[in-house]
Amino acid sequence: AQSVTQLDSQVPVFEEAPVELRCNYSSSVSVYLFWYVQYPNQGLQLLLKYLSGSTLVKGINGFEAEFNKSQTSFHLRKPSVHISDTAEYFCAVSEMGSQGNLIFGKGTKLSVKP
Amino acid sequence: EAGVAQSPRYKIIEKRQSVAFWCNPISGHATLYWYQQILGQGPKLLIQFQNNGVVDDSQLPKDRFSAERLKGVDSTLKIQPAKLEDSAVYLCASSLNAVPGSGYTFGSGTRLTVV
């Protein structure tokens, strides 16, 4: 069965520092990969997704992620974070051939300090 | 384009009471999902509709949860009777179709507290 592991439940970082949020997945078939962001008391917003092609994917708000098939990873990075990036980030997968439902990780809370 | 609308935003009920949540997806989106997000966890799929038919309800606790999408547009999720462990945020999402990789749009969710 497919699963998603987000290795860090909380990541504190200072403003303007780089950040990496880690995500590993497990699946017996090929997958599509997603990162979502959730601000307090709001729904989930799509940051970026990998469907095919280049393994480096750029998303909104300066975020990017790299798909590594051999390591079954899809880590999210930003070179310089802002206070406004404080939120919870969710990695998710959808299996090819499925009905499109997403399997989510448990989330990583990013706290950006001044 | 208007987003996915959900109501109410917040609901507090006592255990054993019933509650209903409403979702209106983006116009033209055939696929509608209900997810349950318990505090500290990622969202978990409860049920997926394609138009007015159920595609996947394998994780829906059918002894107490029910959902419908009668006209293939808006949807209602009901819990009867509620338990303490049902306290969570209930998220509705929609997409154009049920193809993997399709973009989802999520609503803001309904936060349910069962006391």
Image (tube, rainbow, N blue to C red):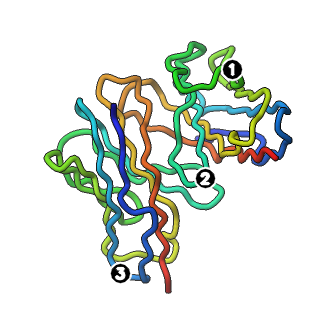
Between A114 and B43, the residue placed more toward the observer is B43
Badge 2 crowding class, 10 Å Cα cut-off, few under 14, some 14 to 19, many 20 or more, is few
* Label 3: which secondary element: loop
The amino acid on which the numbered mark 3 sits, given as a three-letter code, is Ala
Chain of the residue displaying label 3: A
Residue at 29 percent across and 58 percent down: it is: A75
Please tell me how many numbered marks the rendered image carries: 3
Q: Which mark is residue B39?
A: 2
Work out whether B51 lies above or below A16: above
Badge 3 crowding class, 10 Å Cα cut-off, few under 14, some 14 to 19, many 20 or more, is few
Work out whether B44 lies above or below A60: above
The answer to whether A113 appears left or right of A70 in the picture is right
* Label 1: which secondary element: loop
The answer to whether A33 appears left or right of B95 in the picture is left
If you read the primary sequence from the N terminus, does the residue marked by circle 2 or circle 1 appear first?
2
The amino acid on which the numbered mark 1 sits, given as a three-letter code, is Asp
The amino acid on which the numbered mark 2 sits, given as a three-letter code, is Leu
